[in-house]
Image (cartoon, helix red, strand yellow):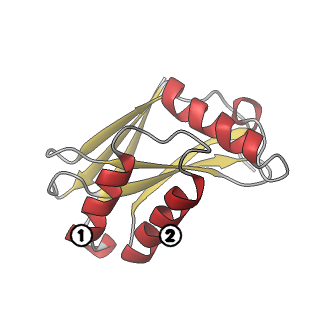
């Protein structure tokens, strides 16, 4: 297991070749125990999305408090590894079902539903893209 380290202040996701705006990317933060945390972002017209620590920590804390037995505090269990992938159509459908189940119970990013439905409507093939992750400390 990798040694635990500080969470990045910012995570930058770059999709190449540069896609149309709105491609949905799953970003995964590896934990030393229990479940990893996931966060969905939608890239801009340049193929880039940025997540700041305040944003992903707020979401992780809400997830952790909702599912106490499944998650640990990312501040002390993050391994230092962040991965990302273009979400498949089945991933997007699962994300939409999760949104529908938890909307109103937990906060979602602004325009999450609209962006998710647009990605589903457009379709996206993970094999068409390569995803790069850059951590900023």
Separation of marks 1 and 2 at Cα, in angstroms: 14 Å
Mark 2, residue position: 94
Left or right, residue 92 beside residue 72:
left
Determine whether the residue tagged by mark 1 lies in a helix, strand or loop.
helix
Determine whether the residue tagged by mark 2 lies in a helix, strand or loop.
helix
> Considering depth in this image, is 28 or 137 the residue closer to the camera?
28
Other-residue count near label 2 (Cα within 10 Å), few / some / many at <14 / 14–19 / ≥20: few
Task: Give the answer, above or below, for where 33 lies relative to 4.
Answer: below
Circles 1 and 2 in contact, beta carbons < 8 Å: no
Name the spot of residue 93 as percent of width and height, x first. 43, 71
Left or right, residue 117 beside residue 36:
left
Q: Residue furthest front?
A: 104
Mark 1, residue position: 121
> Considering depth in this image, is 19 or 83 the residue closer to the camera?
19
Name the spot of residue 60 as percent of width and height, x first. 63, 39
Left or right, residue 57 beside residue 34:
left
* Residue under the point 43% across and 39% down: 109
Task: Give the answer, above or below, for where 93 lies relative to 100.
Answer: below
Using the image, tell me which numbered label, if any, was put on residue 83: none
> Considering depth in this image, is 36 or 91 the residue closer to the camera?
91
Numbered disc total? 2
Q: Quadrant of residue 25?
A: bottom left
Other-residue count near label 1 (Cα within 10 Å), few / some / many at <14 / 14–19 / ≥20: few
* Residue under the point 79% across and 53% down: 70
Name the spot of residue 37 as percent of width and height, x first. 62, 48
Task: Give the answer, above or below, for where 93 lies relative to 45.
Answer: below
* Residue under the point 76% across and 35% down: 73
Dot 1 or dot 2, earlier in sequence: 2
Name the spot of residue 27 as percent of width and height, x first. 47, 50
* Residue under the point 53% across and 50% down: 103
């Amino acid at each position: 297991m990798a040694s635990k380290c500080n969470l990045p202040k910012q995570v930058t996701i770059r999709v190449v070749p540069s896609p149309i705006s709105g491609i949905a990317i799953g970003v995964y933060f590896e934990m030393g125990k229990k479940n990893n945390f996931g966060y969905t972002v939608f890239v801009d017209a340049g193929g880039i999305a940025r997540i700041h620590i305040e944003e992903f920590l707020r979401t992780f804390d809400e997830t952790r408090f909702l599912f106490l037995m499944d998650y640990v505090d990312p501040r002390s269990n993050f391994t230092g590894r962040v991965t990302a992938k273009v979400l498949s159509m089945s991933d997007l459908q699962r994300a939409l079902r999760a949104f529908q189940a938890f909307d109103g119970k937990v906060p979602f990013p602004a325009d999450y539903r609209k962006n998710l439905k647009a990605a589903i409507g457009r379709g996206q093939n993970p094999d068409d893209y390569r995803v790069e992750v850059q951590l900023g400390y």
